[in-house]
Image (tube, helix red, strand yellow):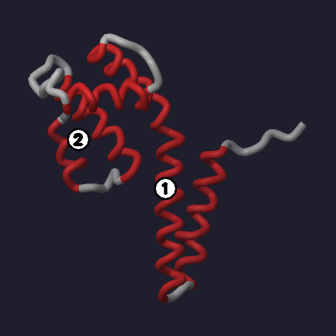
Amino acid sequence: MMDQPAIRELVEAVRDFLENRAMPELKGHTAFHARVAANALGIVARELELAGAATAQEKERLKTLLGCDGTVEDMNRELCRRIRSSDLSLDAPGLADHLERTTRDKIAIDQPTYSGFKQAQLRGV
């Protein structure tokens, strides 16, 4: 039986090919689209690496905030409903921390080079 490469390894190999072999040979619109594809593969690789733990932590924070359990999507809808109806305000214990951590985790996957994200990391936020 052959062991297969991990999905992350496959994604990184294709991204490496695009960035280091194909893109130097490309021009114009094709080079732009190759850059977009390489960036998308970077997001996929970070999603594979970070999303599981981030989602599990988000779910635990939501359970604590809301006092109930469910899918992350359902609990986020409930959180939004409570904020909209003023049943939960920003000064509620743990809410601001939850929002900041969730946002930071999402940026770490989507745009880890974002300057505000880097500054927050340096501040230890």
Tag 1 secondary structure: helix
Query: Residue 124's x, y, as percent?
Result: 19, 34
Q: Nearer the viewer, residue 78 or 108?
A: 78
- Residue shown at 20%/32% (left/top)? 84
Residue reaching furthest to the top: 67
User: Which of pointers 2 and 1 indicates the residue nearer the eye?
Assistant: 1
Closer to us: 34 or 99: 99
Give the camera-side residue of 79 and 43.
79
Q: Point out which mark residue 51 bears.
A: none
For the point 9% across and 23% down, the residue is 91
Residue 121, given in percent of the width and then of the height, sits at 23, 41
Circle 2 is placed at which residue position? 121
Quadrant in the rendering for residue 3: top right
Please tell me whether residue 25 is drawn above or below residue 8 in the rendered image: below
Q: Quadrant of residue 54?
A: top left
Give the residue displayed 33% in from the left and 26% down from the top: 78
Q: Amino acid at mark 1?
A: Gly
Mark 2 or mark 1, earlier in chain: 1
Cβ–Cβ below 8 Å for labels 2 and 1?
A: no
Which numbered tag is attached to residue 42?
1
